[in-house]
Amino acid sequence: MLHSETHFLKANLETDPSILPAGVTVPTTQVEARIPGVHGFGPETPEQFYPLDPRNVRLEQIASLVFSTLALAGVFIALSIVWLNIGFGMLWYCLAAGAFLVVTVLYIAAWFWPPVSHRHAAWRLDAAGLEIRRGVLWQHQITIPLGRVQHADVSQGPFQRMLELGTLTVHTAGTQNASVELQGLTHTMAIQLRDLIVEQRKDQHVV
Amino acid sequence: MSSDLPDPDSNQDSAWTTSDVAEHSTLDREIDNPARGDNRRIEVGHSLADVSANGLSYLHPTSLMFDLLAHGRTYLVPAAFGLWGAAKGDATLLIISAMIFVPAFLVSVFRYFTFRYCITNGQLIVRQGLIFRHVRTVPVSRIQNIDFVQNLLHRIFQVAEVKVETASGTKPEATLRVLSMSKMESLRDAVFGDSASNQTLVPDADWQTDPIQTEVPHSAIQPMANPANGRYPNASGQSPLVTPLLEIPLSWLIKAGMASNRGMIMVGILLGAYFQFVDQKEFFRFEALGHLLPVNASPTFIAVAAIGGVIGALLLLRLLGVGWFVLRFFGYQLVRRGDDLRISCGLLTKVSATVPRQRVQFISVHRNLFMRMFGLASIRIETAGGAGNQGEHATESVSKRWFIPVVPEQRVAELLTALRPDLEWDESKLDFKPLSERTGRRLCRLAFMEAVMLSAVGMLVSRPWGWTVGVVALPLLVMWAIKKSKAMRYARAKNCVVYRSGVFIRKTSVTFFEKIQTLRVDQTPFDRRWKMARLSIDTAAAGPADHRIQVPYLEENFARKELQLLRLKTAQEQPVFG
C-alpha cells in the first residue's frame, strides 16, 4: 500500500509530469484556478511562482507605520528625559537631529519598502511540496516536501482580519526550520492551502 | 484466535478505577493505526503485560532514596547550613533546614507512592499524582529509545534509572527512577520485541513458549553474555541474531584520550571548583613555585626546569583526557540485535542505550588533528527527538554525542554500513563537488580586509609600528582561508547527501533523502555579488552531532538546481523517524 503509492509518485515525477499523483487533489475550483503549481511539474521558471496578495503591501505599510510611530514616541520620551537631566545644549540638539533622521528614514522605509519586499516574495505548491521565496537583501528560498509536514495552521492578526489576510504556518519535525511561515495570503487561500497540504500529508501516511 | 485468552483489562491491578481503564481503551483505539486489527493488537498487549509485571507496578523501593538524592541537590546548601548550625549548637538553623528538608522528603515519598507504570495493550502507561492525576500513555511502537544509567550506588542496589524516549520534543517521555535490573530488562524486551518490527505483529505461540518470559537476565550490563538472552521472537517468529559489531579495547581509549582535548575541559572544571571553594586570600601564588628551585640555579637549569614543567603539564592534561575516556567508555560494546543497536559502556557509571537503526537521522564522522595522526575517527549519530542540550543525561550523550567514541579509520565504513545497510560508504569514491571556484578568492579578499583592520587597530594601540600586526597576520589568515575552503566539500550519492568541513576537527556528515525535513538556499548581499549561495539541509534533531549540513560558497546556479533535485528526491521518499 505504502510502497505502491511511493512508486506512483515516483513514476509521475519521472515520466509524466502532467498527471497528478493520487495524493494531490484540488478541493475547490477556486484553488484550482489560483494554484497552477498543483497541476504538476513544469519548467523551473520564476513565472511558476505565485505572488502574495497585493493587500499584504498595505498591511506591511500599516504595520511599519505603527512601528515607526512607536519609535517616534520613544524618541520623544528619550529626548525629554535627556532634556530634564541636562537641559538643552549642543549634545541635545545633536541627539535630537540624529533621532529624527532615523525616524524619518523609518517612515520613508515604512512606505516604500513593503512594495519592494512584495516583489521579492513568492510561493508555489506542487506535488513535491511547498516552496517559498522571500527577502530583498538577504534572500531565502525554502522548500518543504509535503510528506514532511507535521501539521499546518492558519493565523490572523487584527490588521490581517481587517484586510482578510492570513498567515499559513507549516510545521515539520526539523530543528532549524521547524516551522515555516507564509504571510500575506488571503485568509481563504491560506485555509485552502492548509487543507490541501494536510490532506496530501494524510494520503502519504506520514508517521 | 484470541477467544481462549482473557480480556487484557482483567489483568489490571485493582487500583485502577474503571474509568481509567476505559480511558486507556479509547486512547488505544485513537492511537491505533487503522491498518492494524484491534483484536490482534490486544493479543500482543496481553503478551506484553505478561512480560512485564502483571498490571501496574510501583518503582523499585530504593526509588525513594534515589529520588531524594536526585532532587536533593538543591537542598545541599541548606543541609550544610543545618549541620553547621547543629555543630555550633544553634538550633534555629537546624529548624530552618528541617523546614526545607521534611517537605522535600514528604514530596519524594508522595511521588514514590503515586507513581506507577505498566505495559499493556502495546502501550507504556505511566500514572502519576493523586489529586491531579496524570496518566501518560505511550504507544510502544512510538518509543524511540530505552536507555538506562547505573552509577555506583545504583549498582550496589542492583537497580538502574530508565529513560523512555519518543520522537517528540527534547525531554524523555518518561523517566523511571529507579527500576530493578530484571524489570528494566523485561521492559526493554517488551518494547523492542514489538517495535523492532512494528509493521507486522508477533505470533502468539512464540511469545508463550519463549524462554525470555521465564528467564529474566540479571546481568543487564552485558545482556549479550548469556546466549539465551539474545534470543527473542520477532515478527517472522525467528530470533534475531545478536551481532557484535564493535568492542573498544583499552588501548584505543588511551589513544583517543591522548588525542582529545578533554583534559583541558577537566582542568577548567577543577579550576572552577577551586575558585569556588577556596578563599580568595589563599589564591594560588605562582611566586611560590620559585621556591621549589635550588637557591643558586643556573639560567640553563631554570630554562630546562621550565620546559620540563610545561611538558609535564601538557602530559598531565593528556592523562586527564585519557582518564575521562576510560571512565566513560571502559568496556564499550556495540551490538546489533535485530534492527536495534545497543551500546553499553562505563567504568563506574554504566550506561546502556538502545538506538533503533531506522531512526538514525544523521551520521557524522569526526576526526580531529591528533586522531588523524593516529588514524582514528569517532562517529556520532542523531535520532529524532531529544536534541542534545546542556545538562543532558549520560545516556543521551553516549548514544548521540559519543555513539562510537573511537574507532580505527579502516573500520569506519564497515560500521556505517552496519548503521545503515544501504549506505555505500567510501569517502574517497564519493563524488565531492567543490565549492565555487571563486571561494578561495573571496575568502582571501576577506582575509586581506581582516589584516587591514588588524593593522588599523594596531596603529591605534601603538603608533609607529602597530601596523606590522596586520602584515604578520596576513599570511596566516590567507593560509587559514585556503585551508578552510579546501576542507569544505559537498556530495550527493544514491540515497544520501554528504557534507565535509573543518580544518582542525574534520567533520563528515551524511543524511538520507527520507530524513530531510526542509531545504533552503540563502543568499546574503555578498553572496549575490559573488553569485554564490548557501544550501542548508534541515533534519530532525540537528544538534548532538555538532555539525550541520549548511554548505556555503556554492555556485548559485548549482545550489538552486541542487535544491530542486533534492526536493524531488525527498518528496519521493517516505519520512521514517518514529
Image (spheres, coloured by chain):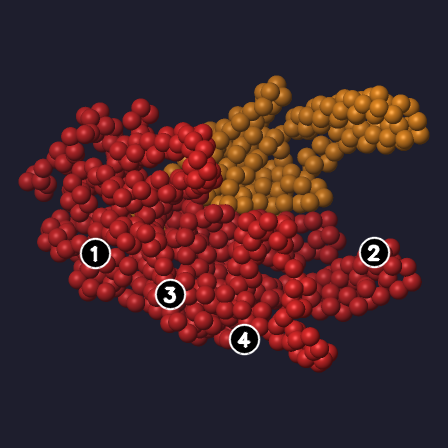
Residue under numbered circle 3: B330
* Amino acid, disc 3: Phe
Q: What residue is rendered at 53% in x and 32% in y?
A: A168
**Separation of residues labelled 3 and 1 (CA atoms):** 20 Å
Q: Quadrant of residue A114?
A: top right
* Direction from residue B14 to residue B109 in the image, left or right: right
* Amino acid, disc 2: Val
Q: Residue furthest front?
A: B89
Residue under numbered circle 4: B373
Residue under numbered circle 2: B457
* Direction from residue B543 to residue B14 in the image, left or right: left
Q: Would residue B94 be seen by someone viewing this image from the given angle? A: yes
SS for callout 2: helix
**Separation of residues labelled 4 and 2 (CA atoms):** 37 Å
Q: Is residue A80 above or below residue A197?
A: above
Q: Which tint is chain B?
A: red
Q: Are the residues under marks 4 and 2 on the same chain?
A: yes
Q: Which chain is orange?
A: A
Q: Residues within 10 Å of mark 4 (few under 14, many from 20)?
A: few
Q: Residues within 10 Å of mark 3 (few under 14, many from 20)?
A: many
Q: Are marks 4 and 3 in contact (CB under 8 Å)?
A: no
Q: Position of residue A79 (x, y in %)?
A: 83, 24
Badge 3 sits on which subunit? B
Badge 1 sits on which subunit? B
Residue under numbered circle 1: B218
Closer to the N terminus: mark 2 or mark 3?
Answer: 3
Q: Residues within 10 Å of mark 2 (few under 14, many from 20)?
A: some
* Amino acid, disc 4: Met
